[in-house]
C-alpha cells in the first residue's frame, strides 16, 4: 500500500531545508536528524551542508533512493518540486506548505494542479497545509515545532489523525505531559489526495496501532468513509471528535474552514453505522483510548465496584447506572465468602466497601473472590489513600490481578500526590486510571460499547 | 455564635494526646504544634510532655482558658471527658472518636447520651466519628493523617464541609496537588449536634469564605437546611455533591451509612429551592468553585469566544450552546474595527479566530475591542500554544484585562507543559483555567447560574 512508504520509510528528503535556526526548514531537518531511524537528505541549492548533513541542490542529485519527500517551499514552487520528486521515484510527498485551498480563489486552482501533477507521476500527497507525520515507530517527524511548544510522546499503541495541525500538536504536547504513549500522529491538512478514509484503511492493517483516534471537521469521503470505518471497527476501535455539534458550532466551522460542517445528525448516523465511538473532547477521547488500548472488552455490562470509601462507591454506582452499566447484587455464597475475610463493618454488597481499615491484601481478596465470578463482566476499583494501612504496593496487587483476568479492570484514584504516584505505577503496568468516577465509568462504557460494536 | 469558638480559637486542648509516633493522638498534637497559631494543651495522665509541650493529666489542670477540646479517646470514655470539658468552660468539643451511631445498636444510645451530656454543659459537639477541622486561617488542624497521605492546601477562599472524613482528606490532598487554595475544611461525621445547616449558617457570615462547597449523603435538617441554604445563596454560592442519584446508588448509600439517602428528586428540588448548585464530582465542584471565588457573575448569558485555533473555537461554541449559553454574532462596527487590526484570514466573527499568526497583543486587542461591548456578558479565551509568536507573557495580557473588566473571563488552555505553566501564572493572578472547553464552559455556566440565583 502507498502509505507503507511513509510509515516504513527508510529515507526522507527535506525540500526547502534550511540552516537558519528556527525556520521551518531547519526545525524539520533537526527533528529528523535527532529522531528518524533512516537516511535524511536536506535539499536546498543555497547550502552545502545543514546540521552536519550533506545538502543537495535538487532532489535529483540525491544519490540514494528517496521514499518520502517533505516539501516546505513557497506554494507556487511546490508543483515543479513535485515533478522533480516524480522523476526521482519518490512515493509520497508530505506538503507542509500553505497557500492552497484554505486561502480560497487561486489557491483552490493551485491545489487541483498539484494533485494532477502528483497523479501524473504516481506520487501520493499528504497535505498541503499540514504538519505531516510524527511516528514513534520510525522516528519520522515533520512537525516543524520545537519540543518546548509541542512535546513528542513516547511510543505507544494509540494513533491520532487530525485535519487540524494545531490540534495534532496540542494533543502531542498533552500526551507527553501526561506520560501517555502514541504510535503514529498524522496531520493531513487539506486532504488534497490522502484523506481520513485512506488513513483509516492503513491503520486498520497496521500492527503498531491498537486504537485509532481522530479529529474531523468535514468528511469528504461520505459513503466510502463509512465503509472503511465499518471494516476497521470490526478489527480495532475508532474514537472520533467531530466539532460543530450545534447550529452555532456549525456556522463557526463554516467561517473556520470555508466548508459546510454537514448536519451533526448526518455525522452521528454515519458514526453509528460505522461503529465509530464519538468523544466530546480530547480528555474524554484519550480517557477512552487508554482503556481500549490496554484492557479486554467485557462480555456484558455487569460491573463490580470495589472501594475503601463508601461515598466513592456510591458515586461510582451512580455513574455506572447513568451510562447504562449495571452494578448487580452479589450472590449469597460470594457475600458469605467475603464475610469470612473482612470485619463485620465492611460491606460485602456491590459496591464492596473495604472501609478505612483496608489493607492492600483486602483489595486482592475482593478482586479474587467477587471479581472472578461469571456474574461480573468488568471491575472498577476505587482507592482513597487516607487509610493508614494502605501502601503503594497496592498497585501491584491490582495490576497482577488485571494481568491474569479475562475481564477489564479500570481504577479511580482519589486524591493528589499519592494518587498520582500510584496512577503512574498502574498505568506502566497497563491498568488505566482516572481521577473521577465519571471518567473511570466512561472508560468502562467505551470498553463495553466497543465490545458490542465488534460483535455486530 | 458558638462556631466562632472553633474558627477563632486561641487555645486547643487535645484529650487523648500521645507521645507514640504515628498514633492519632500524636499526629494531632504534631499538626497543631506545627500549624496552629494559638496555644496547644496536650492532655494525658501518662505523659509529662509531648513534642516539647507540657502535657496535663486532665483538662481541669490546664492553667489557661480552653476554647476547643479535641477528643480522641475510646468511645466509652468520651462522655466523662465531655463533662470535664464542661466544667473547664470549653465551648466546642471536636469528637474524633468512632464507635457511636455509625456502628448501630449500643452506639446509637451512646451518641444520644453524649449529646445530652454536652447540652447539660452548654458545649457544642462536632462529630463524633469525624476528622474535624482544617482551617488555613488559624492553622487549626485536627486531621489525624500525615501530610504525605493528606496534603494541606494553602490559604484560599473556598470552604468545604463533608459528612465523609475520607472525602475531606482526599479533597485536601487533591487541592494541595493542584495548587488550589482553601479556607476552612470541616469533616462533621455523625452530625450528632453541629450539622451541615449550622455550618452553612456560620460560613454565610464568614468573611474568609467566598464559596461554600459540600459533600452530603443525607440531610437531617430538611426544611431548616433549605431555609439556611436559601439565605446563604443570596450572599455567596453553595455547590453541593449529593451521592445516590440512581436507585442502585441510593441502595448503596443505605448499606454505607445505614440511613436512607432520600429520593434524589427531593434533594434536587430542595437544592433548586435553596439555590444550591449541584456538582457530580469533585473535579466539577472545584472547577466551578474556582471561577466563583475569583470572577464576577455575568449580567447575561452572551459569551465571546476568542481562539487561535479554529477547531478549539468551534468546540467551545458547541459546549456553550449545549449548556444554555449564547455565542452572539458581533455587531458590524466591532467586526470592522477588528478587521483593521488583524490580517484578512483571521475570523472576526464570534468565535474570533486569531489563527496561527497570533501574537500576545492580538489577544489583548480582541479582548478590548470585542470583549468590552455591552452585547457581551462573559469571555472564554482559548489558547493553543503552538503558534511561534506567542509567549508566556500572554498570561499578563489576559490577567490585566480580566482585572479591570466588569465581566468574567475564563480560559481554556490546550496542550501540556506550556499550558500548565501559563495556567499557574493565570491562576495566581485570579483567572481560572481549564484543560477542556466543556470544563471552561461549565465554569462560565456556574457564574451565570449563580448570578441568576443571587438575583431572585
Image (tube, coloured by chain):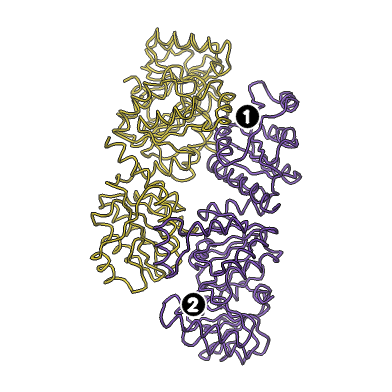
Chain colours: A yellow, B purple
| Residue on which disc 2 sits | B24
**Quadrant (top left, top right, bottom left, bottom right) of the N terminus of chain A:** top left
Are discs 1 and 2 less than 8 Å apart at CB?
Answer: no
How far apart marks 1 and 2 lie (CA) works out to: 56 Å
Query: Both on one chain, marks 1 and 2?
Result: yes
Numbered disc 1: what chain? Answer: B
Q: Taking the image as drawn, is residue B426 in sight? A: no
**Secondary structure under the numbered disc 1 in the rendered image:** strand
**Secondary structure under the numbered disc 2 in the rendered image:** helix
Position of B81 relative to B295 (above/below): below
Disc 2 crowd, CA 10 A, few/some/many (<14, 14-19, 20+) = many
Q: Taking the image as drawn, is residue B67 in sight? A: yes
Position of A168 relative to A111 (above/below): below
**Quadrant (top left, top right, bottom left, bottom right) of the C terminus of chain A:** top left
| Residue on which disc 1 sits | B353
Left-right relation of B197 to A80 = right
Residue A93: percent from left, percent from top: 43, 18
Left-right relation of A302 to A134 = left
Position of B377 relative to B25 (above/below): above
Residue B389: percent from left, percent from top: 64, 31
The image shows a total of numbered marks equal to 2
In depth, the one of A192 and A393 nearer the eye is A192
Residue B77: percent from left, percent from top: 49, 88
In depth, the one of B400 and B191 nearer the eye is B191
Which label sits in the foreground, 1 or 2? 1
Amino acid at each position: 500500500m502507498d502509505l507503507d512508504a511513509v510509515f516504513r520509510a527508510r529515507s526522507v528528503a527535506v525540500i526547502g531545508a534550511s540552516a537558519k535556526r528556527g525556520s521551518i526548514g531547519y526545525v524539520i531537518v533537526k527533528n529528523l536528524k535527532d529522531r528518524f531511524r533512516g537516511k535524511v537528505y536536506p535539499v536546498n541549492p543555497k547550502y552545502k551542508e545543514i546540521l552536519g548533513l550533506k545538502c543537495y541542490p535538487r532532489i535529483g542529485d540525491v544519490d540514494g533512493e528517496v521514499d518520502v519527500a517533505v516539501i516546505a517551499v513557497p506554494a507556487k514552487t511546490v508543483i515543479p518540486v513535485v515533478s522533480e520528486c516524480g522523476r526521482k521515484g519518490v512515493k509520497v510527498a508530505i506538503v507542509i506548505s500553505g497557500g492552497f485551498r484554505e486561502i480560497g480563489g487561486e489557491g483552490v486552482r493551485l491545489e487541483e494542479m498539484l494533485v494532477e501533477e502528483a497523479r501524473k507521476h504516481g506520487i501520493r500527497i499528504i497535505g498541503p497545509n499540514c504538519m505531516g507525520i510524527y511516528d514513534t515507530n520510525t522516528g519520522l517527524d515533520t512537525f516543524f515545532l520545537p519540543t518546548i511548544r509541542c512535546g513528542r510522546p513516547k511510543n505507544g499503541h494509540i494513533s491520532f489523525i487530525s485535519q487540524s495541525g494545531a490540534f495534532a500538536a496540542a494533543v502531542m504536547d498533552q500526551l507527553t505531559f501526561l506520560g501517555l504513549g502514541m504510535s503514529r500522529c498524522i496531520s493531513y491538512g487539506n486532504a488534497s489526495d490522502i484523506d481520513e478514509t485512506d488513513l483509516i484503511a492503513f491503520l486498520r492493517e497496521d500492527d503498531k496501532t491498537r486504537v485509532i483516534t481522530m479529529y474531523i471537521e468535514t468528511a469528504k469521503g461520505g459513503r466510502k468513509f463509512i465503509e472503511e470505518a465499518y471494516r476497521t471497527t470490526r478489527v480495532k476501535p475508532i474514537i472520533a471528535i467531530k466539532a460543530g455539534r450545534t447550529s452555532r458550532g456549525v456556522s463557526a466551522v463554516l467561517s473556520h474552514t470555508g466548508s459546510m460542517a454537514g448536519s451533526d445528525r448526518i455525522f452521528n448516523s454515519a458514526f453509528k453505522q460505522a461503529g465509530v465511538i464519538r468523544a466530546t473532547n480530547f480528555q474524554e477521547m484519550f480517557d477512552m483510548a487508554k482503556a481500549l488500548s490496554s484492557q479486554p472488552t467485557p462480555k456484558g455490562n455487569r460491573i463490580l465496584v470495589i472501594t475503601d470509601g463508601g461515598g466513592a462507591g456510591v458515586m461510582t454506582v451512580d455513574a455506572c447506572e447513568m451510562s447504562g452499566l449495571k452494578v448487580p447484587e452479589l450472590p449469597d455464597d460470594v457475600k458469605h465468602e467475603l464475610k469470612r475475610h473482612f470485619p463485620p463493618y465492611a460491606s460485602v454488597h456491590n459496591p464492596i466497601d473495604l472501609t478505612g481499615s483496608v489493607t492492600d491484601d483486602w483489595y486482592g481478596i475482593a478482586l479474587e473472590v467477587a471479581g472472578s465470578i461469571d456474574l461480573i463482566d468488568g471491575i472498577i476499583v476505587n482507592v482513597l489513600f487516607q487509610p493508614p494501612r494502605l501502601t503503594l504496593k497496592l498497585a501491584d496487587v491490582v495490576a497482577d490481578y488485571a494481568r491474569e483476568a479475562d475481564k477489564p479492570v479500570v481504577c479511580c484514584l482519589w486524591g493528589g500526590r499519592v494518587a498520582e504516584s500510584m496512577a503512574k505505577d498502574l498505568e506502566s503496568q497497563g491498568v488505566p486510571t482516572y481521577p473521577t468516577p465519571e471518567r473511570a465509568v466512561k472508560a468502562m462504557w467505551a470498553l463495553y460499547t466497543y465490545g458490542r460494536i465488534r460483535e455486530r
